[in-house]
Image (cartoon, rainbow, N blue to C red):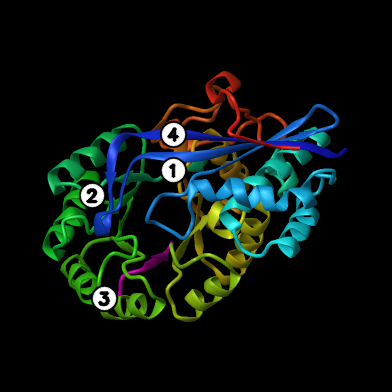
Amino acid sequence: MKITRIRLWHVPLTSHAAYYMSDGKTCDTVETVVIGVDTDTGLTGWGEVCPIPHYLPAYARGVAPTLAELAPVLIGADPVGPEALMAQADRWLQGHVYAKSALDMALWDLTGQVAGLPLYTLLGGRRSADMPLYHSITCIAPDDMARIAREALNQGMTQFQVKLGASGDWQTDAERLRAVRAAVGDGPLVYGDWNCGATSLDATRVGRAVEHLDVMLEQPCPTFEECARVRAATGLPMKMDELAQDTASLLQAHQMGLMDAVALKLSKFGGLSATRRARDLCLHLGAKMCIEDTWGSDLTTAALLHLGAATEPGRVMNVCDLSGYVGPRLAPDGPVRKAGRIAPPEGVGLGVSPDLDLLGTPDLILD
């Protein structure tokens, strides 16, 4: 089997409700990138990556030139066995892992199709029938966040990510956590996420104001050292996100006592291949994992669910149905949440493919 062509589309995804985070970061309409890796057998592997503007050093319009640069390595290559070809791509072009994430996903999809197996089988075997989801609550007024939490709880959700920092004062952030904790009662997991937007002082003041509650803090500050000060001052468990981007950062977070939990996002590590290696390290280090991605629709959601389903269930804190937060749905048969949980697709490879009528004419063809 040989790769004969790579097609690329830019697709706008609109959040069902405007999504507010710290430091003025918002998600309303973002651009996802879909790629199709075509082969001489007629099979196509599908990949997706969706960077959030102002969130990480990645942007949607950087995927096309990255793939164009990699075309001499990719066109004519055998796609089966993704890690071999990804190693060649890394030697040809260092970095740009977010763009390579979509490519790696498409290669895994092709490998699964050739093997006649779903990706969770190739990634180690299915360990879970389905997995718990978390519900991410946009940073708005505390009472409105509590209402959103109650609605999600009534739909079966038991884990709640409370966005913090959008109003710029620590007292309101503390009230947000108190309101959501009261709305969902004892038991459900509640954690406050600043997306690196807090100073260690403000995050510490919030943490001390809610230290009597059962809550966790997520990535309050932009450096490990600042997060460690917050952890030490509050005694609250800590989840890493933005700073967790490779094995070295995972080891550093673990050594500094910051990794009670960690978000493993496909596009930050460079795709399923690299994220699986990070997953295996986290199993050794003892961290709970949120297996997800920065943003996206059905293809990305399917990929992360396959990896989650192939992971020891007791170590999967949660996964995310990214496609449930945005429209349009790229794949009408994509997985959907049910009573706070979600299962991976059952078909071969990713088990989903995009609606070609929705994608329309490719923005780039490499052959």
* Residue on which disc 2 sits: 139
**Residue 145's spot in the image, x, y percent?**
20, 44
Q: Amino acid at mark 1?
A: Leu
Disc with the residue nearer the chain's start (4 vs 2): 4
Q: What distance separates the C-alpha of mark 3 from that of mark 1?
A: 29 Å
Disc with the residue nearer the chain's start (4 vs 1): 4
- SS for callout 2: loop
Disc with the residue nearer the chain's start (3 vs 1): 1
Residue in front for this viewpoint, 96 or 262: 96
The reply to whether the C-beta atoms of the residues labelled 4 and 1 are less than 8 Å apart is no
Left or right placement of residue 137 versus residue 314 in this view = left
Q: Is residue 94 above or below residue 7?
A: below
Q: Which residues are magenta?
A: 234-241
Left or right placement of residue 68 versus residue 164 in this view = right
Point out which mark residue 4 bears.
Answer: none
User: Is residue 321 something that shows in the picture?
Assistant: no
Nearer mark to the viewer, of 4 and 1: 4
* Residue on which disc 4 sits: 12
The reply to whether the C-beta atoms of the residues labelled 2 and 1 are less than 8 Å apart is no
Point out which mark residue 133 bears.
Answer: 1
Disc with the residue nearer the chain's start (2 vs 1): 1
Q: Amino acid at mark 4?
A: Pro
* Residue on which disc 3 sits: 200
Q: What distance separates the C-alpha of mark 2 from that of mark 1?
A: 19 Å
Disc with the residue nearer the chain's start (3 vs 4): 4
